[in-house]
Amino acid sequence: MKILNFGSCNVDYVYSLEHIVNPGETLSSQKLEIFPGGKGLNQSIAAARAGLPVCHAGCIGNDGDLLLDILEKSVVDISFIKRVEEKNGHAIIQVTPDGENSIFLFAGSNEMVSKEYIDSVLEKFTDEDIVLLQNEISNIDYIVKKAYEKNMRIVLNPSPMNEKILSLDFNMLSYIILNEVEAKAITGFDDAQKSLEVFKERYPKLKVMLTLGKRGCVYMDAEKTASRDAFSVKAVDTTAAGDTFTGYFLAGISKELDIEETLRLACAASAITVSRHGAAPSLPDISEVTARLSEFENN
């Protein structure tokens, strides 16, 4: 079993500011840092550091060597990545002293994922493999359709949320991993419990993993519901918290751990991530997560 992540690879420009810039306001940044990032890249690295065999597929520009380097060093298979003649996708990230962030994206090379390229990658995988998707590349609807036809398990993190997500057939998905904002956009409800009820009614076979920020997370499938509180840590940068959670949640279900242990590991990994700066560089490996679990649980 392998994980095929069709995902974005971004260069993150992280500006440290006193507060998120308001409309019409000009602020001087205290610091600029440049990191490898993108939800796809972050989730591939998180899953690989959690101990999974991960293949990353997507397009990078000629300025994307930094991204290939960190994927390779994280033991992610980069043989399916395609170079294109386009500026690499990048993100502009504002980060405040208390760890809150605001992000906007330039898609660049991430929008060069063609149907022909998708077909050429998927033909190398079977129904024993898992496809992981976010919403920072082109043609995700086509990937869902083709992966479903191959009877692959499909895991979707619908971020960033937009009309592309709402046009997908959620009945083709195996898992959806989302936050409250994304859940509201899909179901129409702010309340987490009501959102879960809507998912269960509309898509009875879909397994839903709903993250609730500082309040933890709730998992629901056709047979059971499980929840867990978040671990309490001092957050300095929440940029890749959700990506870390996704990678470790995927590790749990791939290794067939029980859901309670899966949530425990995913929450601990996310807690480590938010306590450090940057996206990809802040992602912990499984040895660190297991070593710090007792520390978190005794706080």
Image (tube, rainbow, N blue to C red):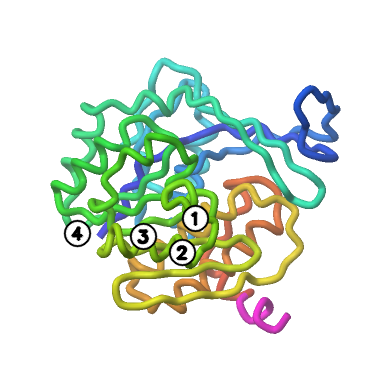
Q: Height in image: 178 above or below 207? A: above
Which residue in the structure is indicated by mark 2?
Answer: 194
**Circles 3, 1 touching at the beta carbon (< 8 Å):** no
Please give the name of the residue rendered at 51% of the width and 36% of the height, measured from the top-left corner: 67
Would residue 139 be found to the left or right of residue 262 on screen? left
Q: Earlier in the sequence, mark 3 or mark 2?
A: 2
10 Å crowding of disc 3: few (<14), some (14-19), many (20+)? many
Mark-to-mark CA distance, 3 and 4: 26 Å
Residue 297 drawn in magenta: yes
Mark-to-mark CA distance, 3 and 2: 9 Å
Residue 47 drawn in magenta: no
| Mark number, residue 275 | none
Question: Residue 224: where, in percent of width, then height?
Answer: 36, 78
Q: Nearer the viewer, residue 11 or 76?
A: 11
Q: Earlier in the sequence, mark 1 or mark 4?
A: 4
Question: Which of labels 3 and 1 is toward the front?
Answer: 1
Would residue 73 be found to the left or right of residue 96 on screen? left
Q: Height in image: 163 above or below 114? A: below
Q: Earlier in the sequence, mark 3 or mark 1?
A: 1
Q: Amino acid at mark 1?
A: Phe
Which residue in the structure is indicated by mark 1?
Answer: 189
10 Å crowding of disc 2: few (<14), some (14-19), many (20+)? some
Q: Amino acid at mark 2?
A: Lys
Which residue in the structure is indicated by mark 3?
Answer: 199
Question: Residue 138: where, in percent of width, then height?
Answer: 36, 30
Q: Nearer the viewer, residue 112 or 55?
A: 112
Please give the name of the residue rendered at 73% of the width and 80% of the height, measured from the top-left corner: 299
Mark-to-mark CA distance, 1 and 2: 6 Å
Q: Earlier in the sequence, mark 3 or mark 4?
A: 4
Q: Secondary structure at mark 2?
A: helix
Quadrant that contains the N terminus = bottom left
Extent of the magenta region: 293-299
